Amino acid sequence: MTRIAVFGTGYLGATHAACMAELGHEVIGVDVDASKLAKLEAGEVPFYEPGLEEVLKRNLAAGRLRFSSSYQEAADFAEVHFIGVGTPQKKGEFAADLTHVDAVIDTLAPLLTRPTVILGKSTVPVGTAARLAKRVRSIAPAGDSIELGWNPEFLREGYAVQDTLHPDRLVVGVANESGDRAEDAAREVYAQLLDENVPFLLTDLPTAELVKISANAFLATKISFINAMAEVCEAAGADVTVLADAIGHDARIGRRFLNAGIGFGGGCLPKDIRAFMARAGELGADQALTFLREVDNINMRRRTRMVEMVRDAVGGSLLGARVSVLGAAFKPDSDDVRDSPALNIAGQIQLQGASVNVYDPRAMENSRKIFPTLEYTTSSVDASRGADVVLVLTEWDEFRNLRPQDLEGVVRGRRIVDGRNCLKPSDWTAAGWEYRGLGRPLQHGRRRVGDPE
Ligand code: UDX
């Protein structure tokens, strides 16, 4: 059992704190946001993450997990300190904003009077860990007896508990690869996972930082690759979903992360590829990553393409059109709307004169905060009342399972645009709907008896 402090109780920190307690450690979660702490203490997760609430409640009840705003309490208590605060994009720049990471170090270090290990989890520009290690040693009373390592986090929202307790691999970067207390601490904290043969990769500090950002750059590139193919398919009248299935059978390529649609969003991929380009520029390696600018461009073009497709669907102008938007979160099983392509598209369509009704099973509250001018409704049917066109922008199961008869007599025009290629076109065309998917040929609805000529 290790006594652990986790700084930051957002998507990453709260999950990490609860999961470390689940592994049997004694954990204190620390944050500066009193309202988050109050919720967590009461066993309530301040965001939607399947399965996390159970882990949180179980470990609070077992007395292994608590929350506090006191750095002093954390410094007195813990042997290992994890940094799990956010590193958002700087306003008006591509670079990452390290304010929160720096604040944790600057507040914590002066309180460290005994030998301690700090393990960073936040996604940071390469070089940050070495800089922080130097800083912490210079300001901590325990000085050189503080070891700082970097242990990047690869969790996906929606699968955060599973990814933390059963990761594909553990990566730990340390300053001294031939014997380091940060390595020992990590091996102790993750002992149960190591027993289960999770691969453990010990690296130097810059490699650990780069592993995380390059993994995200690869995933973003894979999505933009298939979205570029979708553009070509649209021009050539081909079907990108079939193409993805076919190339995905090649094990070297693989089918996962080849879903074409309105592209990637969220709190990680978009800002990470930009921060990566910015950092490479600072290091004089900017040429190596110029392709990421294209990855970003392809991704952003998908949003515009979706708006054009909707405009076409309603006859060339969005002015006065009624549009039903199903999905606001950046992906299913999440209430996160940070850089969400769905909300961005809903906003653009409204700005072009349409009236837009939005429905999402979980992300309504967060959407309303950042896009208060959109109309929010309580169900797919409610959103689609009188609609000229229905858009599916997040592939929640609830929308995948939607049937044309659910919307029969509700909509004004039987047109559906599938921004995630998650519907079966023939289900809709058979019921007389016009179906459009991204990177797929337009499919007209079969005429039904009684339809107007
Ligand atoms: C990502 C990484 O997957 C994770 O390893 C890292 O730790 C954090 O960033 P996350 O942001 O939770 O995780 O979401 P992810 O599942 O990667 O999806 C990112 C975006 O890509 C979503 O908007 C999703 O809709 C989109 N996407 C994903 C596609 O458009 N097509 C795909 O095939 C896959």
Image (tube, grey):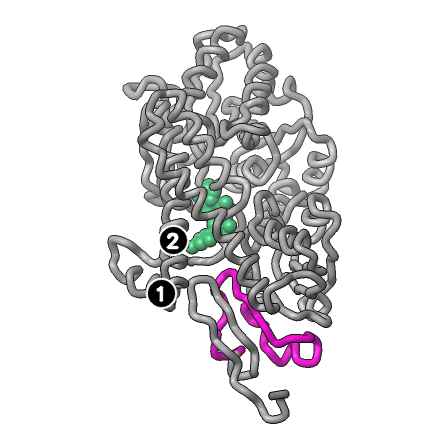
Residue 188 visible in this rendered orientation of the protein: no
Quadrant the C terminus occupies: bottom right
Considering only vertical position in the picture, is 184 above or below 379?
above
The residue shown at (44%, 21%) is: 128
Q: Which residue is mark 2?
A: 228
Left or right for 176, reference 31:
left
Residue 62 in the magenta stretch? The answer is no
Q: Residues within 10 Å of mark 1 (few under 14, many from 20)?
A: few
Query: How far from the left and from the top, in percent, is residue 135?
Result: 49, 11
* Residue type beneath disc 2: Ala
Query: How far from the left and from the top, in percent, is residue 294?
Result: 40, 42
Left or right for 196, reference 322:
left
Query: How far from the left and from the top, in percent, is residue 215?
Result: 37, 40
Considering only vertical position in the picture, is 32 above or below 452?
above
The residue shown at (52%, 12%) is: 114
Real-space CA distance between mark 1 and mark 2, rounded to the nearest whole angstrom: 13 Å
Left or right for 347, reference 287:
right
Q: Is mark 2 within 8 Å of ligand 1?
A: no
- 29 or 395, which is in the foreground? 395
Q: Quadrant of residue 332?
A: bottom right
Q: Residues within 10 Å of mark 2 (few under 14, many from 20)?
A: many
Q: Quadrant of residue 106?
A: top right
Query: How far from the left and from the top, in percent, is residue 246?
Result: 29, 65
Q: Give the structural element (helix, strand or loop) at label 1.
A: helix
* Residue type beneath disc 1: Ala
Disc number for residue 322: none
The residue shown at (43%, 67%) is: 440
| Numbered range of the magenta stretch | 400-428
Disc number for residue 236: 1
Left or right for 269, reference 405:
left
Q: Give the structural element (helix, strand or loop) at label 2.
A: helix
